[in-house]
Amino acid sequence: MLDLLEKCGISDSNYGSCVGGKDWSSTENSGINKSVNPSNEELLAFVFEAHESDYENVVKEAQSAFAEWRKVPAPVRGNLVREMGNALREKKEVLGSLVSLEMGKIKEEGAGEVQEMIDIADFAVGQSRMLYGKTMHSERPNHRMYEQWHPLGPIGVITAFNFPVAVWAWNAFIAAIAGDVVIWKPSSSTPLTAVAVQHICNDVLKRHGYQGIFNLVIGKGSTIGERMLNDKRLPLISFTGSTAMGRRVAEVVSQRFGKIILELGGNNAIVVDAAADLDLATPAIVFGAVGTAGQRCTSTRRVIAHAGVADTLIKRLINAYKQVHIGDPLQKGTLMGPLVNQGAVDTYMEAINAIVAAGGEIVYGGKPITGAGFYVEPTIARVNNDWDIVQNETFAPILYIIEFEELGEALELHNAVPQGLSSSMFTTNLQHAEMFLSTAGSDCGIANINIGTSGAEIGGAFGGEKETGGGRESGSDSWKQYMRRQTNTINWSDDLPLAQGITFDI
């Protein structure tokens, strides 16, 4: 473990603020963030939290950096992101293991998360040459109209513990090629992964003579987080977290007319049709529900199963769950690690008790696992879709089984939750598949056929609807969210005609 931490640049004590490519703070009197290994509850290391004065220094340095970075040609900005991707390739194994060590996801998922960072870097490099505008025909003679996109400024990125590094990269690399600079506040549950990434950033920035492009501030949400939300110098806040906190972010940032990207809760469902291939559906459901111990925003929470296949499917799921090895996430063969902390275990148990109190049937699991670490049993329960506990997301490996008779009923059940992130249907019926993807089908930002809800690819824009928050990160045209649109009209005539044929003679 010590060797792993050293390879990632982690000491017993670490500073919590850094201007990228320049200086780490030296503040030691603003609180201590202790990072604990969720698999055994042992202290890994601690981070000195940033003071508000550290935050102020980072923002001022970021503003100064932005003034120059925005002038750098976008393909050149893309080359810096290319170098970030190359550096991450070299650190993939150790950084992925650190993600597993600090957050608790299994080693393969930790490495997969770093691969997401590499993939979005590659995507961003290409995107840096495709920040396209539009040309339009003017209604006025000898005029030309076009649209172009400009950088926004220093943007704030607030990330969650479950994907402690990938979500930062989704935002930071796209923002960087757009000409923005980034101020990152990571989750207090996973500060070491952020410190490790900042070390990688610093090496790349210093090598290429840049400062202040990627910056880090580790601190409490009540201090540093609130400063970011209220800071008019940050034109965009990208926030990943709970729906409750998302409401707070939206309220505060909108009051100052800032822009927001919100990636909030998911209550993702898989509809298993009567014509489903259960050999495909079963492993997809298990991975979606059990992967990352149910702590993904795209985790499968609900299975809406046709009454004719529900019992068979449940038997298959129980058999599969019995084969899920739970244990140290860094050990080979482990398929499910711990929850992130004791609070998550408590929330899991509250959900189990609520299911039973509502009249639900626990068909598998339902208990914490005794001993060191924050382990619980992956759980399957028969429930009704309208119960409060089912309507709300529980960030734990609890899978709800809900039955339906007709496709229309399934779609109603599917959409009858406040969240709208990821969705899936398993079917071999083409008409049912197309219905699920139609305007009358899934109301989610992501809708899949014959694959699960979890494991989105970075090439597609990622995000959801309703209480999931709105906004998109990662692929497609999400770069537009990190830039401002400008319409330009050029008159190359000797006259001054007005739009809409208006005359104004003077």
Image (tube, rainbow, N blue to C red):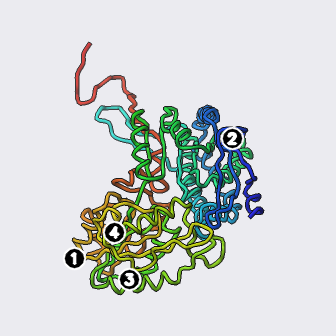
User: Percent position (x, y) of residue 255?
Assistant: 39, 34
- For badge 1, the amino acid type reads Glu
Element on which disc 3 rests: helix
Marks 4 and 3, the one that precedes in the sequence: 3
Residue where numbered disc 2 is placed: 210
Where's residue 464, x and y in %?
Answer: 39, 56
Foreground disc of the pair 1, 3: 3
Query: Callout 3: few (<14), some (14-19), or many (20+) C-alpha neighbours within 10 Å?
Result: some
What amino acid does circle 2 point to?
Answer: Tyr
Q: Amino acid at mark 4?
A: Ala
Q: Residue furthest top?
A: 506
Q: Which mark is residue 453?
A: none
Q: In terms of secondary structure, where does tag 2 sit?
A: loop
The quadrant of the image that shows the N terminus is bottom right
Read off the residue under disc 1.
Answer: 406
Q: Marks 2/1: CA distance?
A: 59 Å
| Distance in Å between CA atoms under marks 1 and 4 | 28 Å
Mark 1–mark 3 distance (CA, rounded to whole Å): 19 Å
The residue positioned 30% from the left and 32% from the top of the image is 140
In this image, 31 relative to 159: left or right?
right
**Mark 4 vs mark 3, CA separation in Å:** 22 Å
Of residues 230 and 130, the one nearer the viewer is 230
The residue at which mark 3 appears reads as 314
Earlier in the chain: of badge 4 and badge 2, it is: 2
Residue underneath mark 4 = 357
Q: Nearer the viewer, residue 317 or 62?
A: 317
Counting residues from the N terminus, which is met first, the one under dot 1 or under dot 4?
4
Lower sequence index among marks 1 and 3: 3
Dot placed on the residue nearer the N-terminal end, 2 or 3:
2
The answer to whether 235 is drawn above or below residue 381 in the figure is: above
